[in-house]
Amino acid sequence: MTFLNGSLLAGLGLIAVPILLHLLLRRRPRRVEFPAIQFVRQRQLPQKRRLRIRHWLLLALRIGVIGVLSLALARPSVIFSGDWALQEEPVAAVLIFDTSVRMDYRHENQTRLELAKELAAWLLAELPQQSEVAVLSSRGGPAAFEVDRASARDRIRRLESGADSLALPAVIRRAWELLQTSDKRLREIYIFTDLARSAWPVEGFAQLRPQLETALGLSVYVLDVGVQEPKDFALDALRLPRQILSSRGELVVQTHVRAIGINGDCTVQLDLLTPDPATGRRSLQKREEKLCQLQADQAQEVVFRLRGLSTGVHQGQVRIVGGDALPANDIRYFTFEVKPPWQLLLAAPEAAHLAPAFVAEALAPREFRLTGQARYECRLIRQDQLAETDLAPYAAILLLDPKPLEEALWQKLAGYTADGRGLAVCLGRNAEPIDSFQTPSAQTLLPAALRMQVRRPDFDVFLAPADRQHPLLAEFRRMSGATPWDAFPVLCYWQLGELAKGVNVIIPYSDGRPAVLERTVGKGRVLTLTTPLTDDTNHDPWNLLPVGDAWPYLILVNEMAAYLVGASEQQLNYTVGQTVVLKVEKDGARRSYVVTAPDGMTFTVQTEGPQNQLVISAPTLPGNYRVQAGSGQDSPDTGFSLNLAPEQTRLDRISPEELNELLGAKNLRLARSRQEINRHVSLGRVGQELFPLLIGLVACLWGAELLAANRFYKD
């Protein structure tokens, strides 16, 4: 126990006053002659005892009032942790600031970070003299004690929010490690945060909590600068089904707009960066807008569709028109590339059971060809014409139920694929005899040797993707619900031998054997199907994939073609923290590229590896990045966009109970105002004050004394 005002304990000497008054003012007996004196003497002894007890009780109450009042004015306090301190004892303090973009939420014309900096400046002045102070933020930086308070104050003033913020557990751990280097007995951690749930991941506190709970002299103060009931409109992450599309195709940009604690109308607008023909400078031009009527805590889907885009790299943004409390979730950026229609070569033998037009119609439907919307230009030839055909103009080749090929043709296809093109081999009943498919040249393309045909006439075998993470299955991944593959059974397929090294099974059958396999050959890739895509269902078919409402078949064929031509492999849109990888060239002639960031700053990067890839390690500024060759004066060769992860701008808050579970309630104190901070800091340094309890006891004793005095002396 310690006392804030120890000098007032001298007031305990006033206890002698009621004792002296009691002794000096006690009544003395008078002699009175009374005839019946014998009766008085008989009652004198019990009355004297009763009177003495009353006087001693009244004396005890008066002593208690004075003594307890003196103790209360001395303001005693108790620290139950077994340690004690003085109010002005120097401490080692670490001030931690959440500097994520959420802290830019504006309320009462002040951002959360501005409020935190204002509160920290006041707190810095309240710390005891000779205290050690460190300032850390979730954006990283060195963990060290500042030279003096002026340095700490300047560090706080220069804090800014950023998209590259760390989760708070990592920063708290660094603060605790720094405090362990201090020789101060009292150590304090102050966390300035808006209590957003995304900043407090549960997995980050598993090992940290026991260390904080067992530390002697440590107090953790969480200073809540957030808004209890935030109001905001927010955009979810953008979804682009295609980042590389044909000039005959359609750009589709999808997102959701959410209302957080607010009702009202919200306008969402799509802008494209368009270069000025005269100066070459790019500016945003509105292409389309949508009006959304939202209820609180509800979301509405927004879909933009654009056609007639010129070839090249295009960049733009989707934004909420007008300002609101948090600008960071009002805008999302995107990049896409438009290419001329891809040339596809389809080769099939002449056979009565084959219907190669199935594949050609799935890739380029007649209606799309007539209206100029087909993104593929398909040329269908006989297999025997393949040897004399120039393959250079074609982005991909599909061998539909091929017959045995000559060794020279296998070599020609291997060279074509190794040069960075795509090849699909759809095996069927024509793959006999199998000797031609077992040659060394054939095996450089195929995933394994052919073993035998497996017949499953019970209609119980079908395509069964184990997951949808492969780019070829991206369109199925975007669909809600399961794909009814069991409605399109496979009746016969080729069983393969041991798979070659590096072969990946993209889709297996329901019996576990491989259906669609992938193999990388040089810079290109080969897809192998162990059942055909072109069987006429009237001639003992190998599968029923193209039968009936065969929309899974149409999607599968189109996704295979898109994967082969590279339309689904290039990623142009990233989130903050990801490493950007761009395929910028094929010939290797240029290796130096200039990258222009959204803020106008430029830097140079070099291509890497045999694939001539451009690798940019984890850029942190959201926006559209322009990538140009050489001096950067030409049109951009490519570009990419960087967006905040949606969880970085979520405003839902963690509850005090959950916070206690994460950090432990022993040393944790949550405060929202200066008064609460003062109270909690006093409690943490000098313990629990007993003044309220003692002053209440004074009132009770005083009341009891008045009652007793009135009762004893009422006669």
Image: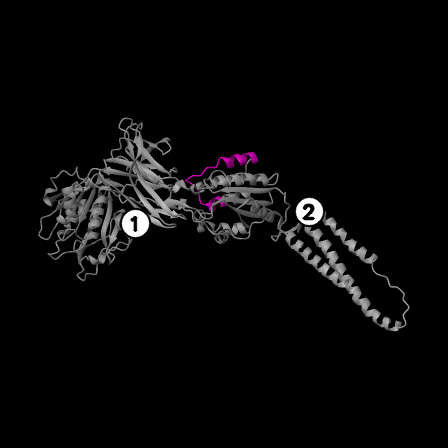
Inter-mark Cα distance, 2 to 1: 69 Å
Q: In this rendering, does residue 70 appear at all?
A: yes
Q: State the image coordinates of residue 487 (x, y, percent, origin top left).
A: 21, 58
Secondary structure state at the residue bearing disc 1: loop
Quadrant (top left, top right, bottom left, bottom right) of the C terminus = bottom right
Residue 5, numbered label: 2
Using the image, determine if residue 92 lies above or below residue 34.
above
Task: Give the answer, above or below, for where 482 lies relative to 634.
Answer: below
- The answer to the question of whether label 2 and label 1 lie on touching residues, with beta carbons closer than 8 A, is no
Q: Amino acid at mark 2?
A: Asn
Judging by the rendered image, the residue that carries numbered circle 1 is 469
The reply to whether the magenta stretch includes residue 171 is: yes
Q: Is residue 641 magenta?
A: no
Which quadrant would residue 696 be assigned to in this image? Answer: bottom right
Which residue of the protein is positioned furthest toward the top in this rendering?
Answer: 278
Q: Which structural element holds mark 2? A: loop
Using the rendered view, name the quadrant where residue 163 is placed.
top left
**Foreground mark, 2 or 1?**
2
